[in-house]
Amino acid sequence: MTDSQKSDETAADLTEVTAPVADQADAVQATAEQATVGETVAQADVDQEGLAAQAEGGEVPVAPVEAAGDESTAIQSPAEEAPAPAPVPHPAARPAPSPAAFAARPKPAAAAPAAAPAPVASATSLAEAAKWGRVEGDGHVFLTIDGDEHPVGQYPGVSKDEALAYFARKHDDIVAQLLLLEQRISSKAPSTDMQKTVTHLREQLAERNMVGDLRSTEARLDTVSAQVAELEKAEKAEHDAVRSAELAAREAIVAEAEEISGQDPAQIQWKTSSARMNDLFESWKTAQKSGIRLGRSNEDALWKRFRAARTVFDRHRRAYFSQLDSTNSAAKSAKEKLIADAEALSSSTDWGFAAGEYRRLMDEWKASPRASRKDDDALWARFRAAQDVFFTHRQAANEEIDQEYAANLTVKEALLVEANSILPVKDLAAAKKALQSVRDRWEEAGKVPRADMGRIEAGLRKVEDAVRHAEEEKWQRSNPETKARTNSALSQLEAAISGLQDDLAKAEKAGDQRKIKGAREALEARQAWLDQIQRSASELS
């Protein structure tokens, strides 16, 4: 970002932030301008009255006189506080005005006498101003601070209230500027020149040429000065944070560029990485143009690293593609040989051997280095065409064989229906005999088409599994060891039930309800176990 762009952006931000302050300041400025206009008119009236007095030999009105740092005084205008014109000489000592000048003098209205200049109202009331100042009869005004009086100036020819109001307005001007400064601070406006304004206001207060609560204003000014210092501190912290973020962003660009350039040239994705390196370079240029300045040393060091990473990347890319060109010819030669072998096998009718050879050639093709994309695609099309010729011939031969096996399929489907009639198995011996008969005729029927082979074999296997499962269940029921364990469990349960029946009888005789309930629950549980074991034993018998 150029300096002019930054200046424009800062000005725009300041305008947006200080808009509410400016609205309030306009009111203060309007009051000040109103006062200035009134004082200028008053001064003009004084000058005109002076001309009239010159012409008519009358008295000349006098502008207010303000006290300097010492006891000397200077004549100043109420509006501009600048030195007034030199004192008008006595009528006897000055030349008379010309008739033309006298005729040009404005004539006062006949109905009303010339009035004294009207002062602009002060923001501080006269009662408030009277707490901090007083006016003598000759227009001298004094300020009271910490119990001591200080002369602030003189405004002769007006009333005491008007003289006091004039010097109170000077204090109001300071307060208005202080208010504007407080509003700028509260709105977080840029702190540029704020401390300079504080210093200027402090110097104006130190001149003691106004009437008002100067100590209170000085205390507010001290508070504002501390707030400005805090605002400057916050702005510096924000600036440092932005600068740190910008530095981190630049570091990230450089680090990613170094990471890309540090990859193995044999493994890197050149198209993706080249595009990413270009994006990083554009990001760098944008940050360099529009981002915050990081200092010459930081920017130079980061640029050297970034430039070095790009240089290494470009060198690796050129070397890689140079090597790629040299290996492309070797890859083409190797794949040309594989294509020749594939084309030689395409007319073979030894289906099993040729299919195995094609698998081997495919493995070699995959292991071969790649040529350029255009060359590799063309070579692959030739290799695939040779395979397609062979497999098309084999498919045609298989279809011819499948037509011969169609009659066998009809026989086996009829046998499969016969086998399914065995299920469910009720007579194991008869089922085994029927299944064996089906198996014998199944083998005699021969092969079926390849597409139906899985379905037919799965159907017969289902019947075989059912017969085998029935045979296993019969053996388990006739197992002597299983019978012995069942009989032992029956004996134990019968003994336990007999004991529980005795316990229940004793509990009922004793009338113990708790024992009666426990004995009944235990007896019911043992009886349920006994019923289940008895059913299992009946199945084994």
Image (tube, helix red, strand yellow):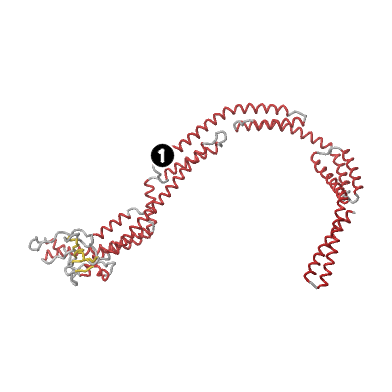
Rendered view: 447 above or below 220: above
Q: How many marks?
A: 1
Q: Position of residue 151 (x, y in %)?
A: 20, 64
Rendered view: 496 above or below 330: below
Q: Position of residue 314 (x, y in %)?
A: 50, 33
Rendered view: 103 above or below 426: below
Rendered view: 45 above or below 396: below
Q: Position of residue 332 (x, y in %)?
A: 62, 28
Residue corresponding to mark 1: 300
Instruction: Pick the residue in front: 342 or 475.
Output: 475
**Residue visible at 61% across and 26% down in the picture:** 330
Quarter of the C terminus within the rendering: bottom right
Instruction: Pick the residue in front: 490 or 197.
Output: 490
Q: Is residue 207 left or right of residue 426?
A: left
Quarter of the N terminus within the rendering: top left
Q: Position of residue 496 (x, y in %)?
A: 84, 62
Q: Amino acid at mark 1?
A: Asp
**Residue visible at 91% across and 50% down in the picture:** 427
**Residue visible at 8% across and 61% down in the picture:** 93
Secondary element type, mark 1: helix
Residue occupying the far left of the picture: 92
Instruction: Pick the residue in front: 320 or 233.
Output: 233
